[in-house]
Image (cartoon, rainbow, N blue to C red):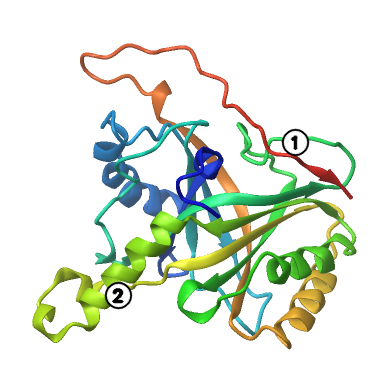
């Protein structure tokens, strides 16, 4: 993918993983997370307005277990080239939570069960949906789209499947990570803050959405385990979207509410 191709800057999505104690409630996490995000949301050069926050559903996978108790996903409207990302520069442990910057991604594939098009970045949270998160570290893979597509194709056959999205780490994000990794390994820069960064940039992320009323959890785990037997570097977890936070709906001093703008969606979606 050419990083100078304007189409490579469409559907930009940022993921952040948060390692937190399993006993931390959503309310306790939000009390930590909301004030942390607010300064970034207020910056016009960040351009982040809506964030989906999801919470892990534990107890399903005894292999390749994704460690993040919470994950946030935010995106930018088509054509926006963000200069600053959410929680930019914030990685590592803060209190009881460890923040992992997973990277900025480009949507590479989207499929759903029936309709020919759908918004892969929902404006509302569907309480009847649960999603499988599959992820592989950029340091542990050089795979192309075919590998995550194999995972998604296995999930299509599981009862309850609704749709899926596959994201690839943006070339600019990949190059930035490579530069930081080199700095970390440079003994002359041993005192760099990057030395203490979790540095878990993902190369690919797959989100597979299932109906929580009809999903076959055992079938999902078996399909993931079969995939894992071949591709050992992937990790998995069930997540439930808890909230869609629209920061533009929160009035701030000196600002007024504006009408919500419609995000452009040019993604071609294949019906399964």
Residue at image position (52%, 18%) is 261
Q: Specify the label residue 148 is tagged with.
A: none
Residue 11 left/right relative to 45? right
Of pointers 1 and 2, the one earlier in the residue sequence: 1
Residue 63 image-quadrant placement: bottom right
- Rendered location of residue 6, percent (x, y): 50, 38
Q: Dot 1 lies on which element?
A: loop
Residue 186 in which image quadrant: bottom left
Asked whether 6 or 145 is in front, the reply is 6
Q: Is residue 148 above or below residue 231?
A: above
Can residue 56 be seen from the camera position used here? yes
Left or right, 177 with respect to 263, comes to: left
| Secondary structure at numbered mark 2 | helix
**Distance Cα–Cα, label 1 vs label 2:** 37 Å
Using residue 4 as the reference point, say whether residue 145 is left or right of it.
right
* Residue 250 x, y percent position in the rendering: 37, 24
Question: Which sits in the foreground, 248 or 7?
Answer: 7
**From the viewer's perspective, is residue 79 above or below residue 271?**
above
Query: Which x, y percent locates residue 248?
Result: 40, 24
In the picture, measured across the screen, residue 266 lies left or right of residue 271, that is left
Instruction: Answer yes or no: is residue 99 visible.
Output: no
The N terminus, quarter of image: bottom right
Which residue is depicted at the point 26% across and 57% down?
90
Query: How would you rate the neighbour count of disc 2 (Cα within 10 Å): few for under 14, some for 14-19, many for 20 or more?
Result: some
Label placed on residue 118: 1
Q: Which residue is mark 2?
A: 181
């Amino acid at each position: 993918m050419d990083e100078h191709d304007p189409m490579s800057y469409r559907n930009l999505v940022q993921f952040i993983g948060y390692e937190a104690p399993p006993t931390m409630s959503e309310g306790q996490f939000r009390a930590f997370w909301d004030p942390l995000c607010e300064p970034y949301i207020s910056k016009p050069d960040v351009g982040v307005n809506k964030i989906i926050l999801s919470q892990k559903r534990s107890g399903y996978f005894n292999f390749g277990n994704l460690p993040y108790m919470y994950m946030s996903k935010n995106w930018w409207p088509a054509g926006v080239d963000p200069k600053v990302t959410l929680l930019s520069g914030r990685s590592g442990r803060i209190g009881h939570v460890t923040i992992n910057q997973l990277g900025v991604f480009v949507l590479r594939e989207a499929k759903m069960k029936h309709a020919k098009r759908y918004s892969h970045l929902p404006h509302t949270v569907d309480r009847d949906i649960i999603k499988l998160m599959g992820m592989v570290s950029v340091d542990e893979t050089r795979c192309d789209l075919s590998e995550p597509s194999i995972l998604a194709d296995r999930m299509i056959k599981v009862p309850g499947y609704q749709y899926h999205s596959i994201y690839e780490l943006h070339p600019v994000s990949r190059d930035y990570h490579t530069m930081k990794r080199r700095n970390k390994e440079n003994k002359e820069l041993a005192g760099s803050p990057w030395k203490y960064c979790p540095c878990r940039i993902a190369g690919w992320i797959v989100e597979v959405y299932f109906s929580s009323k009809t999903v076959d959890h055992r079938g999902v785990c078996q399909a993931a385990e079969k995939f894992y037997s071949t591709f050992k570097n992937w990790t998995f977890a069930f997540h439930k979207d808890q909230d869609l936070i629209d920061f533009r709906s929160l009035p701030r001093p000196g600002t007024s509410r504006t009408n919500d703008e419609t995000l452009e969606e040019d993604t071609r979606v294949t019906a399964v």
